[in-house]
Amino acid sequence: MGWLGLEKMLPVKIRSNDDAVDVDFTLKPRRKHPRHPIIHRLDWDAAPTLHGYNRVKAKKKETLAINSENKHPVLVVGKYGKGRVVAFASNPAGGWGMDFVEWGSYDQFIINMVAWSANLLPEK
């Protein structure tokens, strides 16, 4: 499966091959989805700086979190076939996410993304 085949499954559209943006920002949950199982009850006030992201466009209105500086989507969820998909457009560890791993809610955030994708958490 090529890049375009993968993009069909993702809840985002890839803007280009050169979509990397090196900029410091914090991940900010959208008020529209405050109780979504991936982001609910995490300490967003203590979320550390991310140092970049890939510029993407959400296919539907399922953006859970945005770049605090420019409101670009960073965490987007969706469905593909009978499954669920998550796109996290930054690096959750190392590089852009080197400070993110120190966040007190980091482990729960990763667990939530995986569990929700595996249909182990409620839809919304």
Image: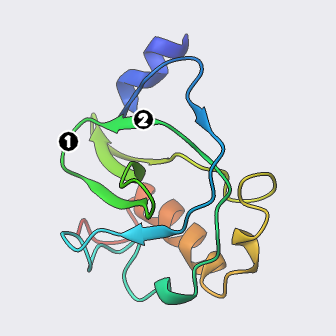
| Rendered residue at 23%/70% (across/down) | 33
Quadrant of residue 68 within the rendered picture:
bottom left
Q: Specify the quadrant that holds the C terminus.
A: bottom left
Q: Specify the quadrant that holds the N terminus.
A: top right
The residue that label 1 is drawn on is 60
**From what the image shows, is residue 18 above or below residue 101?**
above
| Rendered residue at 25%/65% (across/down) | 123
Residue type at mark 2? Val
Residue 105 screen position, x and y as percent: 59, 84
For this rendering, which residue is in front, 43 or 40?
A: 43
Q: Dot 2: few (<14), some (14–19), or many (≥20) neighbours within 10 Å?
A: many
For this rendering, which residue is in front, 95 or 78?
A: 95
Query: Does the image show residue 1?
Result: no
Residue type at mark 1? Lys
The reply to whether discs 1 and 2 touch (Cβ–Cβ < 8 Å) is: no
- Going by the image, does 98 lie left or right of 114? right
The residue that label 2 is drawn on is 56
